[in-house]
Image (cartoon, grey):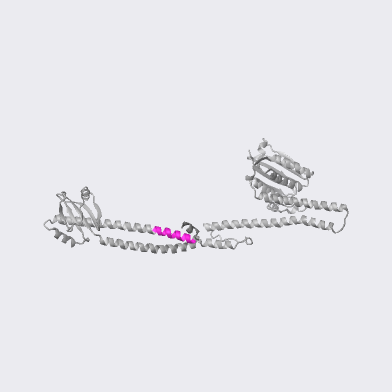
Amino acid sequence: MFLEIYKMQIRTRLTLQFLLLGGLIMVVASVAIYFSSAGFRKDDFNNRLRNKARSTANLFFDKREVDANRILEIENQGPVFLLDEKIIIINFNNDIVYNSDENSDIIIRNDVLERVRLGYNITYRQGSYDVTGTLFFTNYDRFVIIAAAVDTEGALHLEKLKLILTIVCLFSLLLFYAAGRFFAGKALKPISEVVSKVEDISITSLNLRLNEGNGTDEIGRLAKTFNSMLGRLEASFGVQKNFIANASHELRTPLTSINGQIEVLMMKERPVGEYQAALNSVLEDIKSLIDLLNRLLLIARTSSENIDNYKREIRLDEIVWQTRDDLKKFKNDYQINISIDDSVTDFDQMVVVGDEYLLKVAVSNIIDNACKYSPDKTCHIDLRHTDNRVVAVFSDNGIGISETDLKKIFEPFFRGANTLSFQGSGIGLPLVNQIIKNHNGLISITSKPGIGTEVIVSFSAKA
């Protein structure tokens, strides 16, 4: 049953919950009203019965010359009349001095007499009779008065009350159902609108946004969160679209060059020297293509990794020295100067946790950019240990980067306006940024056109 309720639509489920909760409240309230009324009826009737008993006792002891029948007749003619009332007066010796119970319907219980004589007012039921026992004092003796009567009117009122409460409960259930369905529909209307709007959003319409309403209630915050997610998705798809377009362009350029050179060679017979020159050019294009593909694969790899996959302890200073030696093998004109700050008192302070190959790729790209875009082909590297972080500062005297270009420097395939005359693909720094982020590191770039650029990279130190 609970599983079936769970599978219902939210509106139906909320309506039933509202109905059950309201019905339970009404039943509890009706039961409380009924039993409270029954208690009040009982207390009121017992008080009336007790007062009638005392009135009869007063009349009996004031007019002893009047017989019991006459007293009963006088009492019945009084303003307070109780149906089928029975009054018995008993002295301290358990002798009945007055009895209006001609048919002996009321059983005189010894335990009741004992408790009344101890000063208690006793009430109980005997069949259809409400019976009360009370103590009555005269100048000469104490008497126990047992009074009984049938509260037909009170019972009738209780039956009417029970019927009224039952009808009210049933009618209230209908009202609760209608009200629950109305308010559930009203409460869920914004969600229905959100669902309808979301169904209109596809990969081709990520620019659409949900109505945030006042933006402060739960639905507004949900819409705001969803809009924020849509914004991130739109930006991500935009970057992906540009990435694919730029990657296609970068891949097509060397392939087109290779295809053109081969077609030219095949047009006619040529000297061996021309074939060798053309093949060397094709080989350079292939190497450029392979390098680009390797970088694209690295970007794809680093985009799906995080530092949890990196467990090896590596000294950053060794990474820098090894990268310097590797670059010098192919770029003899590069001048790479490395200095270690006085803040490094122990080389264990240079230890970080990460992937050695990826860190080499990141350092190599930063150094290569610094030397490539500097007239003197020089890069200065300063290694430091500050606030339990390993810091590497790369600086050059190159062409610099404008403030406008700095904002886009980490976008794939973006190249500054002043770098178009240099060979490159524009995926070096985005790759560096992704690798450093995956190592929970920080990177910042400051630059001035015509003066130079400074790149600061830092990682949490192992020790």
Please give the range of residues in magenta: 11-25
Question: Residue at left 71%, top 51%?
Answer: 296
| Magenta span main SS | helix
Residue 254 visible somewhere in the drawing:
yes
What residue occupies the far top of the structure in this picture? 345
435 is within the stretch colored magenta: no
Quadrant in which residue 380 is drawn: top right
Query: Residue 16's x, y, as percent?
Result: 45, 60
Q: Quadrant of the C terminus?
A: top right
Q: Give above or below for 327 relative to 232.
A: above
**In the foreground, 183 or 251:** 251
Query: Residue 31's x, y, as percent?
Result: 35, 57
What residue occupies the far right of the structure in this picture? 271
Total number of numbered discs in the rendering: 0
Left or right of 100 in this view: 300 = right
Query: Residue 326's x, y, as percent?
Result: 75, 43
Residue 336 visible somewhere in the drawing:
no
Query: Residue 455's x, y, as percent?
Result: 70, 46
Question: Residue at left 34%, top 63%?
Answer: 164
Quadrant in which residue 50 is drawn: bottom left
**In the foreground, 210 or 287:** 287
Left or right of 414 in this view: 151 = left
Question: Residue at left 16%, top 60%?
Answer: 72
Q: Give above or below for 87 relative to 452.
A: below
